[in-house]
Image (cartoon, rainbow, N blue to C red):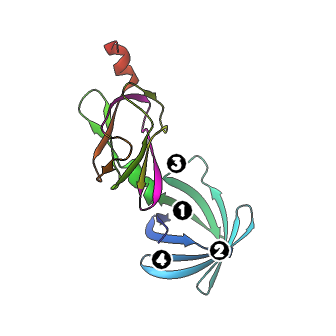
Amino acid sequence: MGKIFTVQVNGAEHRVEIEPGEHGIWQAVIDGKPVTINKYQVSNGHTHLLIENASFDFYISHTPGETQTVEQRSYDITNSGVPHSVIIFDEHRRSLTKSVSRAGAGGDVVVKAPMPGLVVSVLVEPNTTVAKNQRIAVLEAMKMQNDLLAPRDGVIRSVAVTAGQAVNQGQQLFVIGSLEQTEHSGE
């Protein structure tokens, strides 16, 4: 299927797989149950959904004060006058984020392959200074190209892959050190 999300509605979690189609008709699997969704954008922030034979009018706004990230979005949604707190987690983006782990002392971060795939391009080399969310490589998996982003500001300490190389899930790709550590060591 298409994109996979974990959706929390008022604290209750649901798994949603969705494949957008033509003319606002989506095929979805919600908590294991296949459904067809007809989506109509009434106006900005107002969406009408027909899920199977049930009709829903949603008024949607981003939750004030909540930090929105590429892997998590928070919304206040009103349906039939009843407010709901909704958090949507993009599972694909979440898996890319989880591919980062701390390594040893000194604040180094290890970036690992979030899935098996083919390294299409490596955009940095050792001693390159990077900014948080800067593209550092492109990984192809399941016929999709995925940008791998720097999880923090820092300096590339090591690059363990080359373009054209196949990688396994969890394989180390990069080590990123802190800028402060570089400044203090005189590099």
- Considering the numbered disc 1 on the image, is that residue within a helix, a strand or a loop? strand
- Considering the numbered disc 3 on the image, is that residue within a helix, a strand or a loop? loop
Q: Nearer the viewer, mark 4 or mark 3?
A: 4
Image x and y of residue 128, in percent: 42, 26
Q: Is residue 46 left or right of residue 19?
A: right
> What residue occupies the far right of the structure in this picture?
43
What is the distance, in whole Å, between disc 3 and disc 2 at their CAs? 27 Å
Of callouts 4 and 3, which one flags the residue occurring earlier in the amino acid sequence? 4
Of callouts 4 and 2, which one flags the residue occurring earlier in the amino acid sequence? 2
Identify residue for label 1: 86
Q: Nearer the viewer, residue 51 or 119?
A: 119
Q: Nearer the viewer, mark 4 or mark 2?
A: 2
Residue extent of the magenta highlight: 141-160
Identify residue for label 4: 29
Asked if the residues shown at circle 3 and circle 1 are in contact, with their CB atoms under 8 angstroms apart, the answer is: no
Of callouts 1 and 2, which one flags the residue occurring earlier in the amino acid sequence? 2
- Which image quadrant is residue 176 in? top left
- Considering the numbered disc 2 on the image, is that residue within a helix, a strand or a loop? helix
Crowding at dot 1, Cα within 10 Å, few <14 / some 14-19 / many 20+, comes out as many
Of callouts 1 and 4, which one flags the residue occurring earlier in the amino acid sequence? 4
What is the distance, in whole Å, between disc 4 and disc 3 at their CAs? 24 Å
Which quadrant does the C terminus fall into? Answer: top left
Asked if the residues shown at circle 4 and circle 3 are in contact, with their CB atoms under 8 angstroms apart, the answer is: no
Image x and y of residue 107, in percent: 31, 29
Identify residue for label 2: 22
The disc labelled 4 sits on which kind of residue?
Val
What is the distance, in whole Å, between disc 1 and disc 4 at their CAs? 18 Å
